[in-house]
Amino acid sequence: MEPNESDCQAFGPQSTHIGFIGLGTMGKPMAMNLVHAGYSLMVGDLKEDAVKEVVAAGAQAGSNKEICSFADVLILMLPAGPIVQSVLFGTKAAGGSISHSCAAARLHPGAMVCDMSSVKPSESRACRDLLAQEGVSFMDAPVSGGEKGAIEGKLAIMCGGKEADFEKMQPIFQVLGSSAVRIGDCGAGSVCKLTNQMIVADTTAAICEAFIFAVKAGADPECVYQAIRGGAAGSVVLDMKLPQMLAHDFTPPSAAAAILHKDVANCLDAAHEVASPVPYTAQTFEILQSMKAEGMLDEDFAAMIRHFEQLGNCRL
């Protein structure tokens, strides 16, 4: 059964119940912003302290099944695609259908699932196809902006799905982000996020390489930064990450290396699925693999500079 595309009533705070699963570094402030905007929210996460904090702000707590029963819109902000599918469907039933005992079976026809996690496009499309059998719409809408953007409600939201569904989600997106762009049909938001992560990861590696060179060649890295940041080499990534590198300030992470490691692995898988060559991203993944071997993934991904300091036998 297909969702009713003619029903384009926006999901405003006075009429919409939101379920929110995933209260991590970014999910928790996103949920808090929705509560503060007046939405009726039911939340869930494995971290009880995070749930209690959002409940104290005015939300309700529930199990995954209770949240799905409650929700007109279900927002997911989870670490990886397999976790998204496990939360929604449990063990996927044979024949491409969902079990009536899983959480997603509690969603009512006409409900919307908006997955704001960073996943592979193929994972988003698999969720769409299964939920469509229950008359439930699906959008992939991953975000960029880190913890700071989540707290301030200034995330960049990259959306894949039907135009009508995108329009209905606008009031919610306006609470969570400073921009929301529909890239195309389901999966296109995830493609956009992986494109973003390729650029972020590869740029970070290039910054590390270049500034170790600057130090080895006898230049003051702070002076180099101030000289180039306003020119062609300037970027948001440079302004965000180089000060952390100079200060060796990597904990607590604003953007954990573990998340970038996962995202870049997804970049490689998705690129291979469409026969797109990604040699620079493959090399960056091996750098992140080295960080994993060195036990550095719990730190901010700006800690990538340590890998290059070891290669260059110097400190930034």
Image (tube, rainbow, N blue to C red):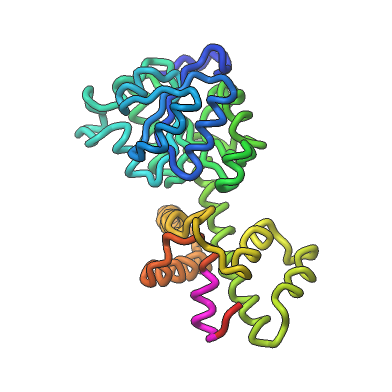
Q: Position of residue 218 (x, y in %)?
A: 70, 87
Left or right for 29, reference 237: left
Vertically, is 280 above or below 185? below
Residue 162 visible to an observer of this rendering: yes
Residue 293 is left or right of residue 16, and the answer is left
Write down the quadrant of residue 117 in the picture. top left
Res. 1 in view: no
Q: Is residue 86 above or below residue 227?
A: above
Magenta range is 304-313
Magenta span has 270? no
Q: Locate residue 170: give its quadrant.
A: top right
Q: Residue furthest left?
A: 94
- Pick whichever, 67 or 60, lies toward us: 60
Q: Residue at x 66, y 82 (%)?
A: 215
Q: Quadrant of the N terminus?
A: top left
Q: Quadrant of residue 136?
A: top left
Write the residue at 53% across / 86% down.
313
Between 107 and 137, which is closer to the camera in this rendering? 107
Judging depth in this view, the residue of 170 and 272 nearest the camera is 170
Relative placement, left or right, of 114 versus 126 is: right
The spot of residue 43 in percent (x, y) is: 41, 28
Q: Position of residue 15 (x, y in %)?
A: 53, 12
Identify the residue at the far front of this view.
56
For the C terminus, the image quarter is: bottom right
Left or right, residue 95 beside residue 153: left
- Which residue is drawn at the image coordinates 70% and 76% (left, top)? 221
> What is the total number of numbered labels drawn onto the structure image?
0
Q: Magenta-highlighted stretch: main secondary structure? A: helix
